[in-house]
Amino acid sequence: MPESKPAQKPDWLIPHGRAWEITASRPIYDNPWIGLTEHEAIAPSGQFTPAYGVVRFKNLAVAVLPLHEDGAVTLVGQNRLPHGDYVWEIPEGGAPLGEDPLEAARRELREETGLLARDWRCVLPKLQLSNSTTDERGIGFLAMSFEQGETDPDATEDLAVARVPFQEALDAALAGWMPDLLTVAMLLRAHHMAAEGALPPELARLMLERSA
């Protein structure tokens, strides 16, 4: 089947101007997952910034879109602390920076859904999730061709699992009902792959068709 290929990098993507210049730094907070550093820095405009806080992440954000042969996707629902709300999203987790992201993706998918996938594709290889105040990076995998195993959620997780038609999930994400950024990005990426012929034709048809 046709694979999606990266386009040639266009000329307008070249950097311009000067980079930020850090003149002093001091650690503010640290735990096993994140650290907060405050910088004194000179902006590209030449403006001096006395207290620029940057959150440093110690894990790579790993996202998995489980795509079934009937065009459905598997989602997980859970309560999230930072926004104090309940969200549906694709399986996600953190990979320590020295870990193979694919191995982390396999683990997160199995732990949260019990799914064991035979077909893996890295479809969003380099994401910056909030690059004005954090250095958090992410990676997105498409997983297909499954066996069902047992779930093994984290001790803090109380997860619900749902299998829903692709278009329903995409519509819910674009309506703002599934606000998780990695979920939105991965659903849009899969839609693009289906529309561009980068997925098996019958699977693409089932993904793109709408229920009567």
Image: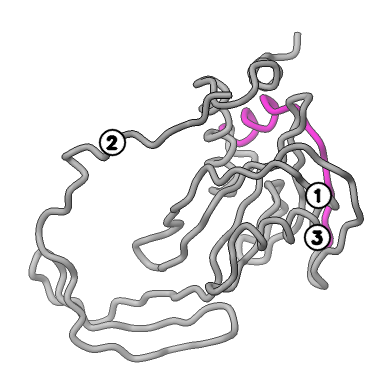
> Residue 16, image x and y in percent?
12, 54
Mark 1 vs mark 2: which is more N-terminal? 2
**Residue plotted at (45% across, 53% down):** 127
126 to the left or right of 113: left
**Residue range (magenta):** 158-174
Of circles 3 and 1, the one toward us is 1
Mark 3 vs mark 1: which is more N-terminal? 3
Residue matched to label 2? 8
> Residue 186, image x and y in percent?
57, 41
Residue matched to label 3? 111
The three-letter amino acid code for the residue at tag 1 is Leu
**Residue plotted at (18% across, 70% down):** 20
Give the Cα separation between the discs numbered 1 and 2.
Answer: 34 Å
Answer above or below: position of 204 versus 190: above
189 to the left or right of 84: left
Give the Cα separation between the discs numbered 3 and 2.
Answer: 38 Å
Tags 1 and 2 in contact by the CB under 8 Å rule? no
129 to the left or right of 144: left
